Image (spheres, rainbow, N blue to C red):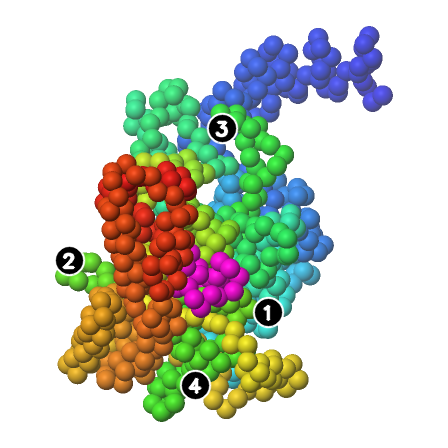
Amino acid sequence: MSGRTPQRNGTTTPRGGQTPSRNSAATPRGGQTPRNNATTPRGGRTPTRNGTTTPREGRTPSRNNMTPRVNGRSPRTRTPGSVSSRRSGAIVSEASSPARRFMTSPLQGLRTSEVDLSSPINYGSPLSSVDSRATGFTMRSGGSVQRNNLSVNRRQRQVDITNYENVTPRPDNENQDVAPNLVIWGTDVVVDKCRLRFQNFIETFCVDETELPHYMAKLSNVLEMEIPYVDINCAHLHQFDSELYQQLICYPQEVIPVFDTVVNEVFFTKYPAADLTHVTKALQVRPFNVQKTKNMRFLNPEDMDQLITVSGMVIRCSDIIPEMRDAFFRCIVCSYTTIVEIDRGNIAEPTLCPHCNTNHCFELIHNQSNFTDKQLTKLQESPDEMPAGQTPHTVNLYSYNELIETVQAGDRVSVTGIYRAVPMQVNPRMRNFRSVYRTHIDVLHFLKSNDSRISFAVEEKNKISEERIEILRQLSKTVDIYDRLSNTLAPSIYENCDIKKGILMQLFGGTRKTSKKKNHLRSEINILLCGDPGTSKSQFLSYVYDIVPRSQYTSGKGSSAVGMTAYVIRDPETRQLVLQTGALVLADNGVCCIDEFDKMSESARSVLHEVMEQQTLSIAKAGIICQLNARTSILAAANPCESQWNKNKTIIENIQLPHTLLSRFDLIFLMLDPQNEQYDRRLANHLVSLYYKNEHYERDEQMDTSLLQDYITYGRETFQPILNEESRQKLIQYYVNMRTVGSGRGQVSAYPRQLESLIRLSEAHAKMRYSNIVEMKDVDEAWRLYREALKQSATDPLSGKIDVGILTTGLSSAARQRRHDLAEYLTKVISSQPKSTIFNYQKLLSETKLAFQFQVTRDMFDDALKEVQDLGQIIVTGRTTIRSI
């Protein structure tokens, strides 16, 4: 037994004459006797009564018996996914596997002062300065690279990059005791190799065999434009080094900070005199265009902490939220200060001052703490990616600093970021968490997905190359550009040339005008398509929705008033009531396509009055009173209430829409099925040709769709035509002629709204020619198109003549005169009888029909009776009795 003496309880006496204590625990060497049955540690440390040890150097443990604080801070612990050191005597990992992140760190035995690493890598420290003259990883612009979009909820640790400036990767068979290689913990990814490979990519990668490397040219743009970031196309990285690309996808929060150091090193080496301190602390890398774009519906736990790309439509952007990154505390007794970093989303206030040993004496100093700008964005799944019969999914996006206010509600974007999962607390005052996690994406890059759509934004116009602009300008000088553009618009729809030209003018829009009192004058053009079912009305709406970026497609029956405007929800971050915008606000500076316009509820249609004329939306809900911009063009389609257009009725009677709403449309087109053999043969020939001809077949007068999109985008934002003297006089003459024609027979053929519509159409036609002057031919074409639309929609079925009063008052002048004649006849008949005489309704109707040559319907008779009743001459009781007064 090697000199050990067994005891009564079966235990042995340790060597060296040590006597066990009463509880049969071994007594430490050196004859030290523990107090209260506690074990005395080595090194002269004195145990406390509860059995814990007193740390060295006079450090006092906190009350909760956790790790002691050092200079007012708790030393940081190692977490999976951190960067570790690789020495020659030990193999850190066998393969780059994400599963190894959950193993024990190989550097647990090293002191914190020797290696201070964790995930994500944050080079430098905000509390210590870095020598700007150092080379290697040193940042010229500041002491640290703080990437909030790479942060995690656990406590972070930082690496002083000056300790690893000139470290070079060493082979495995070489002695590495002097300078260890840094690896991502749990993998065999060497940080220095990653750095050198990315530096080689930045300095040598070329696109299309150009002389200057692609990203070196981008660095020169950074110097000229003073932008604080460099966009890295992941497709280029995959083409250059697929292994490095895979490391970026799997370990973005470790690899991206390495990329940041390389970009800063290369930039300040090439431009040593550059000064970007007023822009940002350091340049940041923003990766985008990940090879495999994920559908937000299929995001799963395998994607957590990995780089992903999702696409969709932005439906909400929150206010900017200040988020605290570290808190500055000061002791109110001795003025000792300390900084506490974020830990699992919370800031733990120090309970004990290490300087004066006073409990609960710290106060938070807000103006000394560090904050970052944060914004919550909700991204909704695109309709084309949504499976049949499913509701759209949404995902929360968190953007920081320069990425805030980058996108707006209604934008279609592709988002590249890191997929995160955050545990949900059972109670905010408790440390317990639920087993269900809440997910979000920390955004690294926004890319507006407008490549296949017409853009109405100025910044998108600037993306068109100079060569493309020259092609567009040469195309605008062709004589038949108007016809070529209209033929390219919705080529699968047969004929309807005037409707295509009207929609084309709607896409260009008029000139934006603002009065001296900052009143916005409408420049958007509204169009209504109505007629028989099956005449391609919905196809026009779908085509416009597909090519316009900020467009919304709704159906009248499935749209409510709040869905069209805005509704109130409670913000999950601030718990305040905020507005969630509807379709009209999301389509700001775009087109809102409304199908089945006639089936929309009255409450939903009522909100369109302000939008279609004032271009604003006034909201007063839940204490929120504001006015939202709704500068949208309305493209609506309506069917007749009798399922087929009745030519003997006006447009008001056919589609049952209020005249106050119809008068706000600039163009109203009537799409009827002519039902004649020649038209049917031409239409059938066109439809069949879509199936048997080659898919690359195009008519000579058509242009490429992408060319059409660029043509409209550049023309809409570049040119703002104004009227000259000739066009001004021409517009006045057309308006006066319209008023004169109707005045002779008691009809109203034009109102001021019709003149404003002519001005907008003339400006749109001038934009189509790439001209800043509205000429006579623009006014003539606008007048012709407007007259063609009026012939179809505002023709009085009684007189066969155009009467704008149908659209503005809901009643033609002829119908108004007939109703007046009927009222006079009824007044004469009733006044000829004594007072309190009772008339039979049916008998009086029959007598009235015989008294007039035109057909008197029951509706006309009821309207006349109502007019007489309003004069106070009769009392109508039900539908059978009429008593005179």
Q: Residue at x 60, y 81 (%)?
A: 684
User: What kind of residue is marked 2?
Assistant: Lys
Characterize the local packing of mark 3: few (<14), some (14-19) or many (20 or more) Cα atoms within 10 angstroms: few
**Residue at mark 4:** 484
- Gap in Å between the C-alphas at discs 4 and 1? 42 Å
Q: Nearer the viewer, mark 2 or mark 1?
A: 2
Q: Residue at x 14, y 61 (%)?
A: 516
Q: Which mark is residue 428?
A: 3
Question: Which segment is the magenta one?
Answer: 637-657
Along the polypeptide, which appears first: circle 2 or circle 3? 3
Q: Is residue 29 visible?
A: yes
Q: Is residue 158 left or right of residue 616?
A: right
Marker disc for residue 238: 1
Image quadrant containing the C terminus: top left
Q: Residue at x 39, y 45 (%)?
A: 841
Q: Quadrant of residue 513?
A: bottom left
| Residue 649, position as x, y percentages in the image | 42, 64
User: Alpha-carbon distance for marks 2 and 3?
Assistant: 50 Å
Q: CA distance from mark 1 to mark 3?
A: 44 Å
For the residue pair 155 and 414, the one nearer the viewer reads as 414
Can you tell which of label 1 and label 3 is closer to the viewer?
Answer: 3
Which mark is in front, 4 or 2? Answer: 4
Residue 324, position as x, y percentages in the image: 39, 40
Labels 2 and 1: the sequence-earlier one: 1
User: Disc 3 residue type?
Assistant: Pro
N-terminal of the two: label 4 or label 3?
3
Q: Are marks 4 and 3 in contact (CB under 8 Å)?
A: no
Residue type at numbered disc 4 = Arg
Evaluate if marks 4 and 1 touch, with contact meaning CB atoms under 8 Å apart. no
Which mark is first along the chain, 1 or 4? 1
Amino acid residing under circle 1:
His
- Front tag of 2 and 3: 2
